[in-house]
Amino acid sequence: MSRIVHLNQPSAARAGADKAAEGAAKASVAPPDPANAGRRTHEFARRVAEFKRWRDELAKAIGDYRTWMEQQGLADGAEDLRIYELIEGLKSDKLTIALVAEVARGKTELLNAIFFADHGERLLPSAAGRTTMCPTELRYDEKEGPCVKLLPIETRKTALTIAEYKRTPIHWTTIHILKPKSVEEVREACLETTRTKKVDVREAEELGLYDRKRRDGPAPADGMIEIPVWRHAIINYPHPLLKQGLVVLDTPGLNSLGVEPELTLSMLPEAHGVLFVLAADAGVTKTDMEVWTRHVQAAKRGGRFVALNKIDVMWDELQDDAAVARNIARQVDETAMTLHVEKSNIFPVSATKGLVGKVKGDAALLARSGLPALEASLAGDVIPARHAIIRDRIVYDISGRIESSRALLESKLTELERQAEGLRKLGGKNQDAIHKMVAHVRQDRQKYDKELEGFQMTRAALTEQANILFGHMSLKSFDELIAAARRDMQESWTTHGLKAGMVTFFGGAAARMDKVAKQAEQIRLVVERIYHRLHDEYGLAEIRPTALSLAPFFVEFKRLEERANGFRDSPATVMTEQHFVIKKFFVTLASRTRQLFSECNEATKNWFRAIVMPVFAQIQQHKAAIDRNLETLKTIHAGMDDLGERIAKLEEARRDLRAQLDVTERLLEQIHRPLS
């Protein structure tokens, strides 16, 4: 089943990378710069640590805001839960890098060189003949001890995805690592990911791992097919980088990628960086090109980069460095032309020499291996991209909430200052004048009480519209869409049936999201009119409700549709017409889209609460202010001696509100603090 996770990520700009001959050979053949290489060697680890620190500080700032909300009596259950979810999401946030390659390209050695050289030897098995047979995640969850978790290949017979199996640990086989510092014990546990077994043809066909009608050809003479023992592996290991939220996904070769649609639809697209590994001595083979076209290019969310590994085979002692550099540069040029990528996205490296250079402290060899350039690119591209995503999603959300809280405080401050000014003017008035003012405030209160009845009706109408809004993206609505798509496939699990089902599926999804966008805009306009009215008639803060942004969900649906179309139209699928793979693909597609529906529904509910809550908070706040003003006037009417004391209390309350506004300013500053 599972397979060893390898972390290597492409990066767009190679920060600090040395340019070698003809601008393509890079540091791998450039004159060694030991000091620079040593500095860059630790760049990725340093940037990961900075990113983790930024996330922790952001989570603390959000926690401080939640505490402040409770102290001010501004929090409610739903709001508190949402903020708690934001904090927990930050704490559990992962930075995922996927490694993709055909077999024998040196992925495991590259992983050892980049992340585990501090062990002084190879942590993960990379000897000849030891090929990882299943997708493998390398990560760390402190709630579980060091272990290797393995999902049996037999689970492919079910309709459940790997993501769903992750929520049911009972199905996994777990090998505990009792001594994490024992390299031998860790290596032995990881060897499980290379295991295979032989099964008869029928079993292999039921698992979707063999099809005698396609290019798999006739069964062997003994009628037995070799298959992986495991479907998926998770290596939970307390390495410093993994403890800081790094996740490495190592994917097997073309055959395994083709039979596990979840890799193409979910795991690779969700990675924040994808590194495609080639072998310099082989160039871009036919199967390499197939992996690149069908799987790597489809992963459009993160950066996509190419590691041209094993350049040490081109280090010819009978040639000078310039000649070697030209040979490597030529290989880089050809690779860039074949894959249609920029040369700056291709990193010639030697994982083996880089590992040796790190272990032996040979800075010159390390610089020549090209690894520092690759690591600097990982640090310079993947982390800032992930930071931007969190900033746009979480910082935007929480800063909007703080701004709403500020508006409420400012409205309260304005009302309080108005009361204080009114009391100061009472100093020279007689009892009759004060009596008339009490009567006037009572009339204001009666008028406002009637207004409240209207606002309650408005609230009921908004709630009704919101229910319609949520209904468009509900899981019930989605399940109806899936049922309709299945009917259109008419139980014909072929590419033709898949096409019919996907037309219904994506057309229905797009229609629902369009309805949500239009309904949300109608609600926003209603709420905006309420704010405007409160501002004009009562002088309350005129908050501008934000629009519901479904752009990230639209983009993700579009990516899924493109990937689905690519799968449907690929020559391999058309030739195969393999019911198992097509059915598995559709089930995976439905599961991933259902998750998106759920996330979109939750985002819509959070948006509605965020724009409506300040409306009614202002209404209640203004009513409370009228009541306080009335009580103050009644007390003063009974005895003018209390006037100075009342003004002093209002002044004290004003200073407190000013202090609270300063708190919100500091919170906003903390929330918007950039990644250093």
Image (spheres, rainbow, N blue to C red):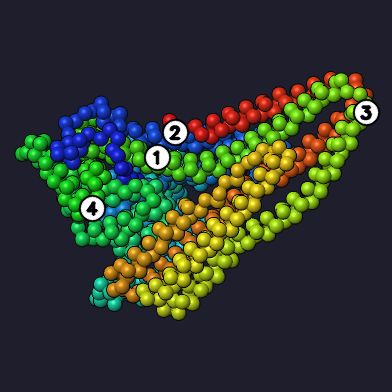
Spot occupied by residue 275 in the image (x, y as percentages of width and height)? 31, 48
Can you tell which of label 4 and label 1 is closer to the viewer?
A: 4
The secondary element bearing badge 3 is classed as helix
Q: Residues within 10 Å of mark 1 (few under 14, many from 20)?
A: many
Label 1 with label 2: CB-CB less than 8 Å = yes
Q: Which residue is mark 2?
A: 675
Distance of label 1 from label 2 (alpha carbons): 10 Å
Numbered circle sitting on residue 432: 3
Residue 93 visible, this orientation: yes
Q: Earlier in the sequence, mark 4 or mark 3?
A: 4
Q: Mark 4, mark 3: which one is toward the viewer?
A: 3
| Amino acid residing under circle 3 | Asp
Residue kind at label 1, given as amino acid type: Ile
Q: Is residue 38 above or below residue 337?
A: above
Mark in the foreground, 3 or 1: 3
Which one is closest to the eye, mark 2 or mark 3? 3
Q: At label 2, which amino acid type do we have?
A: Leu
Instruction: Residue 271: give its label.
Output: none
Asked if the residues shown at circle 4 and circle 3 are in contact, with their CB atoms under 8 angstroms apart, the answer is no
The first of marks 2 and 3 along the sequence is 3
